[in-house]
Image (cartoon, rainbow, N blue to C red):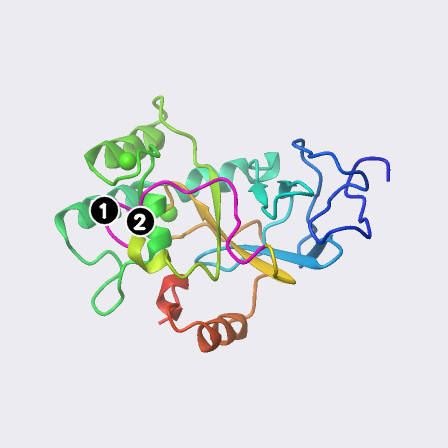
Amino acid sequence: MGGDLAVSAAPPLALTANATAISAPDVSLIPTSTVVAPLLQVVAYAWKSHALLDALNFSSSVDIPVLVPAREVPVDEALITDAAVNLQDAIAILKLIVGLDVNGAGRPLSPYQAIAADFDASGGVDLTDAIGVLKHVVGLTAPAPAWLFVDEADATMATRANLSPGAVEPTLSTNVGSATSVGLVGILRGDVDGSWTGPAGSPSLDVAHFHELVASHAELNLGQWGIY
Ligand SMILES: [Ca+2]
Ligand SMILES: [Ca+2]
């Protein structure tokens, strides 16, 4: 009981032992999969490097089968996070806008890249985003690189791999209600090429995870995780 991550025997997504909805951060993930509720295991990772992400917070409620994942940039990651959004990303946004290959020939744009390219969170990718990244690079006022999370099994993701990726909903409900585990793809806004690899020595998810995922979900493809 007591509030934090009380793993109750009640409904699968009950993060507290009583029936009140909670909104404050409740769970700190350690860098492997973690049980956040009796029947739900969560693993979160960066979309390109597959580095596991710890220090996630969730809110949820007993009545609504959703997860609201959030991750502040930890203090010890501030420098690498800022550095991961750089000139290469601004160039990638410009390539995207004019229709050039962002990843090279035969390597299609990942929907996670399109979402990362929307640096100002307008729902679309345009010059403003490229300018925002450039401002960030030179230290002018600009959006801060921030983590977003999507369900790795989201079947609609492929429709976002373009200049209109749309908004990322803060709540995850896809499959969460009945799932026993959920994989969260972490997208660092602004880091279009996915150069963020985590602190030195960060553990990462084995590539086999993605092969299993695409084997069981026809609408997914390895390329969206930068695996070619
Ligand atoms: Ca935008
Ligand atoms: Ca980058």
Q: Is residue 151 magenta?
A: no
Q: Which residue is mark 2?
A: 114
Left or right of 129 on screen, residue 97: left
Residue contact between numbered discs 1 and 2, judged by CB atoms under 8 Å: yes
Residue at the image point whose x is 53% and y is 75% from the top: 208
Which amino acid is tagged 2?
Answer: Ala
As drawn, the label of residue 89 is none
The secondary structure type at the circle numbered 2 is helix
Is residue 201 visible in the rendered image? The answer is: no
The N terminus lies in quadrant: top right
Residue 32 percent location from the top left of the image: 67, 58
Residue at the image point whose x is 35% and y is 30% from the top: 136
Residue 155 percent location from the top left of the image: 40, 61
User: Regarding ligand 1, which quadrant of the image does it lie in?
Assistant: top left
Which amino acid is tagged 1?
Answer: Leu
Residue at far bottom of view: 215
Where does the magenta region start and end?
161-176
**Of the residues under marks 1 and 2, which one precedes in the sequence?**
2
